[in-house]
Amino acid sequence: MIPPQPASLRSALLCLKLQPALITPCSAAPSSTPIQRRFHSSTNQTAAHRPSAYKPIRSFHHQPIRLATTTASPTTPNSPPSIGPQPLTWPTYFSLRRSRKLYNTCASVVSAFFTTGAGVSYLGQQPIENISVFGFDPIIVMGVTVMGSGAVGWLLGPTLGNAVFGLRHRGIREEMAEVSQSLS
């Protein structure tokens, strides 16, 4: 590693390494470059005391300038540029997928709770003599029926969870479907 050198020695070495054709000023170049600003700020010499080998370095990168336009620009200068929909990144996709699974699980728990309650309420209103099926004990039939209604609610949960997730994240529904298909 080269130790830092004084600014005047560094600028002298810079001018010795560059060929004179590269150091000559360019008339169409824009304002000073960072190298030129550093060159002027690091030396304490004025332009009259500077040797002729020290000519300002100018940038050779030109930016095209349109002098006339045929159509009006779509945005006004004061308005920020419009930002279109950003592509769905993998971390965002996996975060949304995790939240969708959370919606599905919560909806499954809630729907299982309500369907079990509905099954218990319905079976509680029936007389116990009418509940026997294929000769099984009515208590066993009632237990299986209540567990079946809870299972139906648990299986309905992902449908409800996906519907709620889709309503909440309407803008990215198509993008998530595309990414999910690309994984399959």
Image (spheres, rainbow, N blue to C red):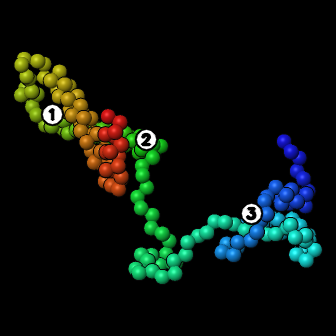
Q: Which residue is mark 1?
A: 123
The residue drawn where x is 84% and y is 42% is 1
Please, what is the three-letter code of the amino acid marked with disc 3?
A: Leu
Q: Which disc number belongs to residue 94? A: 2
Label 3, residues with CA under 10 Å away: few <14, some 14-19, many ≥20 = some
**Residue 103 appearing in the image:** no
Q: CB atoms at circles 2 and 1 under 8 Å apart? A: no
Residue 44 percent coordinates (x, y) = 91, 70
Please, what is the three-letter code of the amino acid marked with disc 1?
A: Leu
- Rounded to the nearest angstrom, the CA distance separating label 3 from label 2 is 53 Å
Residue 14 percent coordinates (x, y) = 83, 57
Label 2, residues with CA under 10 Å away: few <14, some 14-19, many ≥20 = few
Q: Nearer the viewer, mark 2 or mark 1?
A: 2
Q: Is 111 left, or right, of 90 in this rendering?
A: left
The residue drawn where x is 45% and y is 46% is 89
The residue drawn where x is 90% and y is 71% is 50
Q: Is 51 left, or right, of 157 in this rendering?
A: right
Q: Which residue is mark 3?
A: 22
